[in-house]
C-alpha cells in the first residue's frame, strides 16, 4: 500500500470504530422494548442485539435489524465527507472506482448506503464478540 492508501485506511478504520462505539452506546441506553423476557439477564437493546447475533435469530430479528440499521444511518450521517469517502473507498465499489484510470479527476464520490453497510458489518462483528455476565448466562440457557 502507498502512504496515501495507508492514511485513507487509517481514517476509515478510526471513523468506523467511532461509529460502532456510538451505535453500541445508543443501543446500550435503550431499555424500552426488550423482547427477551423479564428474567433480567439482558438489560438493554445492545445486549439483546448481541444475543440475537450470537444465538439464533428470534421472531423479532427483523425489528432489531431495522432499529439497528436506523441507528447506524443516523450516526453515520454525523461523519464528515472525508470520513465517508475514506470508508467508501474500502468497499468493493470504492476500490473499483479507485482502480479506474482518471477516476480522481471528478472528485471522490460517496455512496452513503455502502458506508452504512460497512459500519453495520463492523457493528455485527462487535456484537458477535461481545460478552457480559448477563449475556453469557442468557446464551447458556
Image: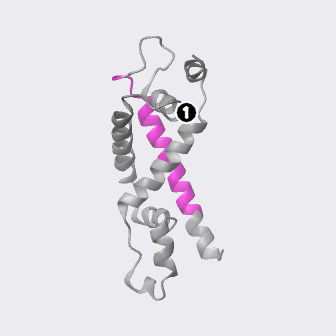
Looking at the image, residue 9 sits to the left or right of residue 86; the answer is right
The image shows residue 58, relative to residue 83, as above or below, that is: above
Residue 23 quadrant: top left
The image shows residue 3, relative to residue 51, as above or below, that is: below
Front in this rendered view, residue 89 or 81: 89
Instruction: Look at the image and give the residue range highlighted in magenta.
Output: 10-33
Residue 86 percent coordinates (x, y): 49, 66
Residue sitting at x 49%, y 30%: 56
Front in this rendered view, residue 85 or 80: 85
Q: Check residue 127 for magenta coloring.
A: no
> In this view, which residue lies farthest toward the top?
39
The scheme the figure's colours follow is one colour
Residue 7 percent coordinates (x, y): 59, 68
Residue sitting at x 42%, y 11%: 38
Residue sitting at x 48%, y 62%: 87
Question: Which image quadrant: the C terminus?
Answer: top right
Does dot 1 land on a helix, a strand or a loop? helix
Q: Which residue is mark 1?
A: 54
Q: What is the chief secondary structure element of the magenta stretch?
A: helix
Amino acid at each position: 500500500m502507498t502512504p496515501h492508501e495507508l492514511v485513507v485506511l487509517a481514517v476509515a478504520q478510526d471513523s468506523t470504530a467511532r461509529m460502532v462505539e456510538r451505535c453500541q452506546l445508543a443501543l446500550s441506553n435503550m431499555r424500552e422494548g426488550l423482547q427477551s423476557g423479564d428474567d433480567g439477564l439482558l438489560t438493554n437493546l445492545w445486549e439483546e442485539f448481541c444475543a440475537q447475533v450470537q444465538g439464533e435469530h428470534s421472531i423479532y430479528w427483523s425489528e432489531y435489524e431495522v432499529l439497528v440499521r436506523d441507528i447506524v444511518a443516523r450516526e453515520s450521517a454525523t461523519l464528515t465527507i472525508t470520513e465517508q469517502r475514506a470508508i467508501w473507498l474500502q468497499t468493493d465499489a470504492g476500490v473499483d472506482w479507485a482502480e479506474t484510470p482518471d477516476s480522481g479527476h471528478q472528485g471522490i464520490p460517496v455512496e452513503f448506503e455502502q458506508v452504512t453497510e460497512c459500519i453495520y458489518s463492523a457493528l455485527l462483528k462487535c456484537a458477535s464478540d461481545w460478552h457480559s455476565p448477563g449475556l453469557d448466562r442468557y446464551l447458556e440457557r
